[in-house]
Amino acid sequence: MLEALIKIVVVIGAIMTAVAYFVLLERKIAAWVQDRKGPNRVGLPLTKVRLFGLGQPLADGVKMMLKEEYIPGHVDKALYVLAPISILAAALATFAVIPFGSVWPTDGGPIEFVVAPGFDAGLIYVFALSGIAVYGVILGGWASNNKYSFLGGLRSSAQLIAYEIPLSLGILGIVLTAGSLKLDAVITQQAETGMWNAFVQPLGFIVFLVAATAEAGRMPFDLPEAEQELIGGFHTEYSGMKLTMYAAAEFMHMITASFLIVILFLGGWHFWGLTGSGDQITWVTALIRVGVLCGKIFLVILGFMLVRWTLPRFRFDQLMALAWKVMLPLGMVNLVLVAAMVEYFPGAIVDRPLIVFLGMSGLTLVSLVSMAILAPLGSKQQPSTLDAEMT
Amino acid sequence: MFDSTLPIFLFVAVATLLPAGMLLAGRLVGPRRDTKVKEMPYESGMDPIHDTRRRFDIRFHLVAIAFLVFDVELLFLYPWAVASRGEAGGIDHAVNEMQWVECRDLVFAGVMLFVALLAAGFAYDWRKGVFKWR
């Protein structure tokens, strides 16, 4: 009980701080991409020390707190307040099952780097909470009683639920190879075989990567807040602390997505020849494992941020078509491939890793090429010709 | 059982109290000034023409229904995925010791039939234009 409470406080504190500083990092990267300097003024409070703008998140937090906590007159008050609370609570609660490392050796037995160590249904839990995020979006959009919010909320919820299916197909392949719903078990399996799931099922990795980006509402899938079309999307009517909560929840979704990508597909804390794979470790190895995991997650988040300034936004019909007509069939192909491999060549990942890697990559290439030839997103599906078909 | 879920409940409680506390803090610290114009919906400076709660495109409903069907069907696959190579009480256990099914292949064939049905439903939806968005 006490151990769990300490872990909860540490995890929530770390996540909130990480969100604040990732916002700063995102602004810095945006600035570098656009050949600006970015936030560089705010440093230590009450002094003139600038410190590369590292005081900016603190100043932003204080500013948001001092803003008026305003509820417009035309909104549905209860739902309007409930929406940001539910989305932030769901985003935070996901971290209860996410491991931040492997174990820490103590005299009284190893302590696991996860808030709820014995919980068996970790992946289902993460999946269920990502469903609650949809509630936050659609409640906010509906309660605001504003046309921009309403359209933004509808769009976002359609996007989120559409991409939940490829997401769950991608996870299904992982559950098949790991034989468990525990995130720990997924990492252990990858560490023991030395084959990260991204090499065993590259197709699943691609599907999951795209779906996780869309679930986090990141570019090129940030339709929810297409500023040019929808002002602020579903949070047009929100301000002050409630807007901060939406923004924080959005960043947390990105961090969760990075954690899931790293843990499920990129080996978690495992790195060849550096971390070992067993449970009996010294504290040096434990630290290295935490370091490797954090490093990987930082790289994935950096990737998300660079993608934001590289790719243009999808049109909404393309977005929906990508989910249903490309990612869903690819996910199903991946499921069948992995199921066949696990069923008929159960030892192949350990015995013949190279053959598994080459075979699965080849099959991935074949599916991607055939998808490109079939071209469900091709010019025949453009809106103008669809109009002609309908008449 | 309860030992493993207690931290989850604690975490959810803390995660709900934190945003509530943030809102309360904002309310206590921030200023409050209501004006008539401020209470209006923000629609690019125009006076709103009518209420938002009107009819909207049926396609959003179609997406929601398609999502429900596919999501639930995928959830049916999770127990099989866990049991497929799970150590204790997996499919091997059901086949060799409990003799519930004759062989593993039968289970695999059943699941593949399920996936094929899913694919057939998917193809039907596609032909019917559920995923057509314009």
Image (tube, helix red, strand yellow):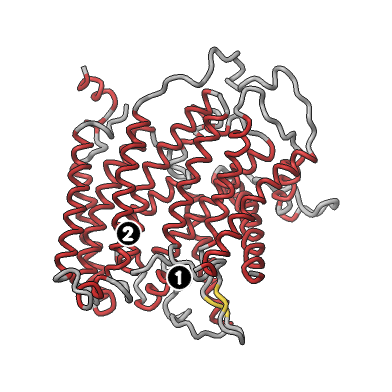
Q: Which residue is mark 2?
A: B78
Chain letter for mark 1? A
Q: CA distance from mark 1 to mark 2?
A: 17 Å
Residue at 59% x, 43% y is A247
Under mark 2, the amino acid is Tyr
Which mark identifies residue A184?
A: 1
Is A39 on the left-hand or right-hand side of A33? right
Please indicate, yes or no, whether residue A60 appears anywhere in the rendered image. yes
Q: Where in the figure is residue A154, as x and y percent of width and height? A: 45, 32
Is A176 on the left-hand or right-hand side of A226? left
Circle 2 — which element? helix
Q: Is residue B132 above or below residue A57?
A: above
Residue at 62% x, 53% y is B15
Between disc 1 and disc 2, the foreground one is 2
Q: Where in the figure is residue A298, as x and y percent of width and height? A: 53, 60
Q: Is residue A3 above or below residue B68?
A: below
Circle 1 — which element? helix
